[in-house]
Image (tube, rainbow, N blue to C red):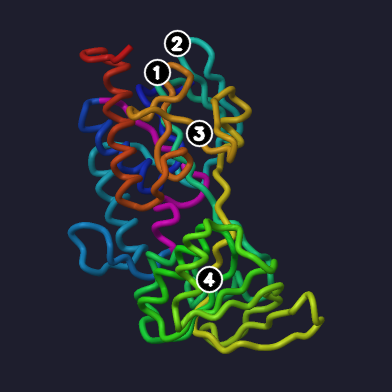
């Protein structure tokens, strides 16, 4: 059985940042990633809000983080899936589709996945007009026509943000009233370039090489129409990748995000979590990096115990 000081599950921004700090602290560190290193950062066509880079593609930023992490001496195993965790006792066991590892501490940085609406064209046009992050991709559509799908707080705040960039914003919601805060509803309705389509569902996203139009079905009238847009921002929520945590006795909140304290500690000693998988409120690359750093330094303190916090 291979043994490591620290194992990190997930090679997104949080996991890679944790790996860098762990290795620099002298910990023998392994990162296990079921896909390719980089996480959802690599999906962003352009990143313009990460300090130090006025503009960089998400793929390039993810590659730089991965290269940096490897240069510190971290082992990154890609295309390896963690199937089970045994977190009882001082030593933790991590079982994958390849083997079982032993570690002194564990950081879970498995992220979250965007909830999709599951219509034709959504997958095909992802990164070509279909987006799940208004702050990340909104500036790419300045002066253009965009659509927001959803009716909760995330959809409302995204629509408000885009209203300051796009020529027009069409909000499609399947009900006849928003589920968001009343103040947000009033703000949206006060925007002259925001149109709301109630009781409607997106049925298909169309285009040649990029998004050009969306087929929308009115559930009250039974009518179907096409709306011309340059982008579709799907805002129907996120789902954290926490099944491993749930199966291992790690506490999660009512939305199944892992509960952590300010040191990124979970309810199990020696087990930490960082990034979008946690209940920390802001989901951005920068905050994921910070949480990963905190988790790594706390794990170092737990293992080497120069300043272990009870």
Q: Is residue 60 left or right of residue 25?
A: right
Label 4: which secondary element: loop
Residue located farthest toward the left when viewing the structure as drawn: 52
Q: Can residue 131 be seen from the camera position used here? A: yes
Tag shown at residue 90: 2
- Of mark 3 and mark 4, the one earlier in the sequence is 4
Distance Cα–Cα, label 4 vs label 1: 39 Å
Task: Determine which residue is flagged by label 3.
Answer: 258
Mark 2 or mark 4: which comes first in sequence? 2
In the image, is residue 252 above or below residue 117? above
Q: Give how far apart the Cα atoms at labels 1 and 2 are.
A: 7 Å
Q: Nearer the viewer, mark 3 or mark 4?
A: 3
Up the image or down, 302 lies above or below 171; here it is above
Residue at x 25% of width, y 35% of height: 21
What residue range appears in magenta? 27-43
Return the x and y of residue 218 as percentages of the image width and height: 74, 79
- Point out the frontmost of discs 2 and 4: 4
Residue drawn at (50%, 74%) of the image:
189
- Which residue is identified by label 4? 126
Element at label 2: loop
* Disc 1 target residue: 104
* Image mark count: 4
The residues bearing labels 1 and 3 have C-alpha atoms spaced at a distance of 20 Å
Residue farthest along the right direction in this orientation:
222
């Amino acid at each position: 059985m291979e043994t490591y000081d620290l194992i990190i599950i997930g090679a997104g921004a949080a996991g890679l940042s944790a790996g860098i700090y762990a290795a620099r602290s002298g910990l023998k560190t392994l990162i296990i990633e079921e896909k390719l290193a980089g996480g959802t950062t690599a999906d962003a066509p352009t990143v313009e809000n990460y300090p130090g880079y006025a503009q960089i593609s998400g793929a390039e930023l993810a590659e730089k983080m991965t290269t940096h992490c490897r240069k510190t001496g971290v082992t990154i195993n890609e295309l390896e899936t963690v199937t089970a965790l045994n977190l009882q006792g001082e030593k933790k066991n991590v079982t994958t589709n390849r083997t079982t590892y032993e570690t002194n501490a564990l950081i879970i940085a498995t992220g979250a996945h965007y909830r999709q609406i599951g219509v034709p064209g959504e997958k095909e046009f992802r990164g070509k007009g279909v987006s799940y992050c208004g702050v990340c991709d909104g500036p790419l559509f300045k002066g253009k026509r965009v659509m927001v799908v959803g009716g909760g707080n995330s959809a409302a705040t995204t629509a408000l943000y885009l209203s300051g960039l796009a020529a027009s914003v069409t909000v499609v919601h399947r009900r006849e009233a928003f589920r968001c805060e009343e103040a947000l509803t009033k703000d949206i309705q006060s925007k002259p370039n925001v149109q709301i389509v109630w009781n409607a569902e997106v049925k298909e996203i169309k285009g040649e090489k990029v998004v050009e139009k969306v087929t929308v079905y009115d559930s009250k009238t039974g009518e179907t129409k096409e709306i011309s847009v340059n982008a579709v921002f799907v805002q129907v929520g996120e789902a954290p990748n926490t099944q491993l945590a749930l199966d291992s006795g790690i506490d999660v909140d009512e939305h199944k995000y892992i509960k952590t304290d300010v040191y990124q500690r979970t309810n199990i000693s020696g087990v930490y979590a960082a990034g979008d998988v946690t209940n920390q409120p802001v989901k951005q690359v920068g905050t994921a990096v910070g949480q990963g750093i905190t988790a790594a330094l706390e794990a170092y303190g737990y293992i080497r115990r120069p300043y272990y916090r009870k």
